[in-house]
Amino acid sequence: MDPETPEQTPPEPPNLAWQRVLLARHPKRPHTLDYIERLITDFHEIHGDRLFADDAAIVCGIGFFESRPVMLVGEQKGRDTKDKLHRNFGMPKPEGYRKAIRVMQIAAKFGRPVITFLDTPGAYPGIDAEERGQAEAIARNLREMARLEIPVISICIGEGGSGGALALGVGNQVFMMENSVYSVISPESCAAIIWRDSAKAEQAAAALRLTAEDLLHLGLIDGVIPEPPGGAQENTDAAAELVRKKIRDSLEELGRLSGAELVEQRYKKFRRMGNFFTTHAGRTLVAGD
Amino acid sequence: MSWFKRENNPEKKAQKPEKGQRKVKTEGLWLKCEGCKEIIWKKDLEDSHNVCPKCGSHFRIDAVARLQLLLDGPYQQFDTDLASADPLEFVDQRSYRERLATAQEATSLADALISAAGTLEGRKVQICAMEPKFIGGSMGGVMGEKITRAIERSITTRQPLIIISASGGARMQEGAISLMQLAKISSALMHLDEARVPYISVLTDPTTGGVTASLAMLGDLNIAEPGALIGFAGPRVIEQTIRQKLPEGFQRSEFLLKHGMLDAIVPRLQLKSYISQALTFFSGPVQ
């Protein structure tokens, strides 16, 4: 693409990225518990970080996926107003991330795979979250997920809100639902910072390349899970079946690797991400310059 | 208190230029300290590594000055010409390529980080310093790769790793690529941890967003300069979320220390000896 010739571009195509943002946030879109209900039998939620509180924005629990024991960890948004407040709109606090890594380590101890669902506008930006070390909690999860000697499958089911989502997303295989988005910053915040106008969110959404195809193309995820026509909110059962198929295949594939191989495979995968470099002409670095 | 205060600093008097030329001559020679609001002579400030000689406020310094402050002498640089290829072809009001070119011109760096190896009080170390003047010290694919390579060099050479953070966080113009650098670096730090090679994270003004939520909080020791802004979310974002004014001193080093997020606050002029002693504790005396 030549940035010098904007006036020759044809009439603007519909902003598909923004449509995906709207679908990812659709009020009827299936959430973590909707998938757990359909895919997991004998699910028992386990609570608390043993340090401060139980964060309802992250649901953790044990259960069986097609009779295989698995640990589930997922961000949960609310459905009605009361539920939304209870779930803090799906924005976890440090105690949520600490609970998540605690249960993942239990799973690793007993050799059980972990399945994580990412769906958050972002980690909660509030005074209490900062006081209790939101950054430390996320950082620790990133490092400790890398150490897990078990299969970790991460699925972005709605909004992959930056570090708040990635803190559950260091998986051996990472998938995105067709209409989910995964971004370093929300389009609104990006627009507010770069364009100094949050109304430019639609433009920002396109510029950020946050759709499943974009991330697949950039080599940042391992696959895209298709959704029923019109989006997952149109048929939650059908969406869950498509997720089921992907989890089944992925567990099968990862099940062949040893603990050490899983750690190695996960590291190699993330190690390669974002290697789009050019050589800076060295103008700056020549001796005597 | 008297109404008028006589200026009796002899050094200042000596510097006082002739009337008439005054404006021209003082241009750029004097600075107002944001901390104590006093006027300070620029050379005094430079001599004290940009720490206000009057109140001890820490001014920001660039990556080169950082390395000069901490290392004994000349150092070897790595990946100096690694630059972003702008994979998203990101354009807002200006294109990312343009922003990169401007920053490269202004800082003489290819991206917002210098990665080097040198000696610190005689001990060989791997050291990375972020450059806050390069697009806010933001972290994209280049910084992620350079830091990861530094971590890997630390593992192979068993030389301690020091990373000095000064960054607004992940670089928006590289979208999810920037985000994934958090996972990439943190995974590499897991291997450094397993290898039991010391890593000291130094947080300076400002360290926020994705840099805090990954490498900056993962040191064996996390130490900060006084008064540095350190946090996950930026203060403005938090104010918008809670719709209240933030308390005084919120997200400053002292606040983080109080809440248990830092091992220590170390003034700039003591950083080198502090790190040296910590490394002696971890790895024993210099061979």
Image (cartoon, coloured by chain):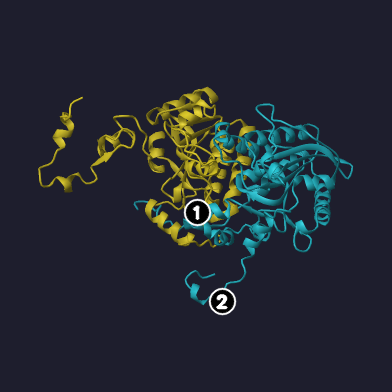
Image x and y of residue A38, in percent: 84, 48
Closer to the camera in the image, B147 or A179: A179
Closer to the camera in the image, A120 or A183: A120
Closer to the camera in the image, B80 or A184: A184
Q: Earlier in the sequence, mark 1 or mark 2?
A: 2
The kind of residue tagged 1 is Ala
Establish if B237 lies above or below B122. Answer: below
In which image quadrant can residue B105 be found?
bottom left
Chain letter for the part of the structure drawn in yellow: B
Name the residue at 75% across, 60% down.
A231
Instruction: Tell me the crowding category of disc 2: few under 14, some 14 to 19, or many 20 or more residues within 10 angstroms, Cα based.
Output: few
- Secondary element type, mark 2: loop
Image x and y of residue A197, in percent: 49, 57
What is the CA distance from the residue labelled 1 to the residue labelled 2? 27 Å
Image x and y of residue B7, in percent: 16, 31
In which image quadrant can residue A180 be found?
bottom right
For the residues labelled 1 and 2, say whether their Cβ atoms are less than 8 Å apart. Answer: no
Q: Chain of mark 1?
A: A
- Secondary element type, mark 1: helix
As drawn, is B8 to the left or to the right of B99?
A: left
Whether residue B61 is visible here, answered yes or no, is: yes
Name the residue at 76% across, 56% down.
A233
Q: Chain of mark 2?
A: A
Q: Which of the numbered marks, if any, corresponds to residue A192?
A: 1
Q: From the viewer's perspective, is the residue at label 1 or at label 2 nearer? A: 1
Name the residue at 55% across, 47% down.
B144
Determine which residue is flagged by label 2: A10
How many marks the image carries: the answer is 2
Chain letter for the part of the structure drawn in cyan: A
